[in-house]
Amino acid sequence: MKTERPADQPDEPLEEALDFLKRMPAPTRPPELDRALLDRITAGSSPAVGLVSWTKRREFMFRLTNWSLAGGALMAAAGLMLMAFLSPSVALGDVLKEAEKHRVVKYKMTQKDEVKSGEDIGALTQIVYADLKAPRSRMIVSMPGHLSGAIDFESVYIHDQAKGLTFHKITETITEKGKTDAAAIKLLKDFEKIGTPRKEVTLTRLQGDFTPATAEMNKSILENFRALEKNKDAKASKDKFQDKPCLLFRVEGDHKKTALWVDETTKLPLKLEHEITDPKIMHPTVTRMIFTLTDFEWDPELKEFKSIDELFDTTAPQGYKVNDQRKKKEGASSEK
Amino acid sequence: MADWPKILAENGNRVWRTAYRILAHAADTQDCYQDTFLAAWKLDSNSRIDDWRPMLVCLATRKAIDRLRQRVRIGARSQPLAIELEPAAETDPASSLRMEELVDRVRQGLTELPEKQAEVVWLRLIEDLAPQEIARHLQISSGEVRVLLHRGRVRLSQHLASELSDSQEFP
């Protein structure tokens, strides 16, 4: 039988619980949290950056980095699109064949998230290089004039499935303004306490999944393309991309939509848009994630890299602090 | 612009602890911690803040309880609480388990209180903020703080008693 304690009687369980809560210890907060927060606060005045907590952004980034692995599951989603249309359309088979001729693809990936609060958190744009023959990718985010113009910030993620490794390099360089402007110098002085300007590399074990495009994360993009051949639910139509006629393919599944625009002449993708609304794989504050891939370059000029292996090299450059989190339990952290 | 490195250095631990006590979940605490300071940053750009500590504790409490509500609503509150008892407190597993359950019920009870009641209960009974400080930061009168505290405490006790009798009835 259910009984309720009269409100004026001493409530020992409540007192006990309150007393415990008052004494309850908390784990040490991660040191990078304050740094990220200060970065956000300092950059918050820029409308392009928007105002969202670092953890949320990290969660979004987590999805994004997973999606970029092996050239991006988005490319795998493209595979899904391509293969889905193979039976009715020769053109899509040709797209796959055309893609197979190349070794590396470069594209711009923009991630736009909608959050429950309706707050505009800004888009995140990255340049991605994906190896078309091996499951590895390189993603670059550049933020020139960060910290009120005092530093240029660059973040490079290299994911290498064969090595089971994620390599993350942060490079902060003091700008001319950071050297000469009194306010910028003062700001940098504050940030020196937390290690700015940083030159550091963090190595972590590769983790994540490839859903919803494919679970075959140990395969290259093209292998993923082939594996996704069985999807038959796609719809094809004629469309225009930048005023030029193209083919548009759409696939809709549970909580996900993919659209692929293909150039009829070159038979290569022009744009890919993937929308996710699945609450199971998103941060609880996010209602929709939209990834857009554009500006495809097939076998692009690598400029500062002598070879493809150098593009995906996971060796820390000289002068970078290395934080090897794969060996963290053994206490490994070294200055290279 | 406020001296944010200093504000973080002076108040970071307190805000972190407040959020963690309510949420008992590391990732949620990180989110709440950042949301709190980002909200304070926004406030600072609109008005002058003289006393950062109680203002930040109030903000952290509000944001953490909101997040807790959200978690309960989506049925994800079964995250491990990762509670560690202090050395002088109960150390046997049965006591620890009982305490975890009690504290979890208090947290759930908090989510069932009206917003202001929950905040006042937490700020007064756990964070030890003075009624005047709570009144100032929640923009209510000290009398209202006392009323909300009394009502909140009664409802929390009733919630706990009801939950406990439920669990005794259906072990």
Image: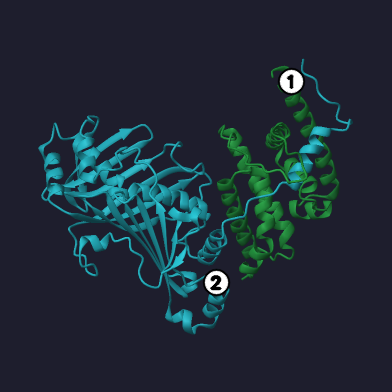
In the image, the chain rendered in cyan is A
User: How far across and how far down the image is residue B39, in percent?
Assistant: 61, 56
Q: Quadrant of the N terminus of chain B?
A: bottom right
- Chain of the residue on which disc 2 is drawn: A
Residue at 61% x, 68% y is B5
**Colour that chain B carries in the picture:** green
Question: Is A96 above or below relative to B74?
Answer: below
- Per the rendering, the mark at residue A191 is 2
Dot 1: few (<14), some (14–19), or many (≥20) neighbours within 10 Å?
few
Answer left or right for B8 relative to A203. Answer: right
Q: Quadrant of residue A77?
A: top left
Secondary element at tag 1: helix
Task: Report which quarter residue A336 is drawn in.
Answer: bottom left
Q: How many marks?
A: 2
Give the percent coordinates (x, y) of residue B91.
73, 39
Residue at the image point whose x is 38% and y is 35% from the top: A255
Q: Is residue A249 visible?
A: no
Side of A315 where A36 appears, left or right: right
Element class at badge 2: helix
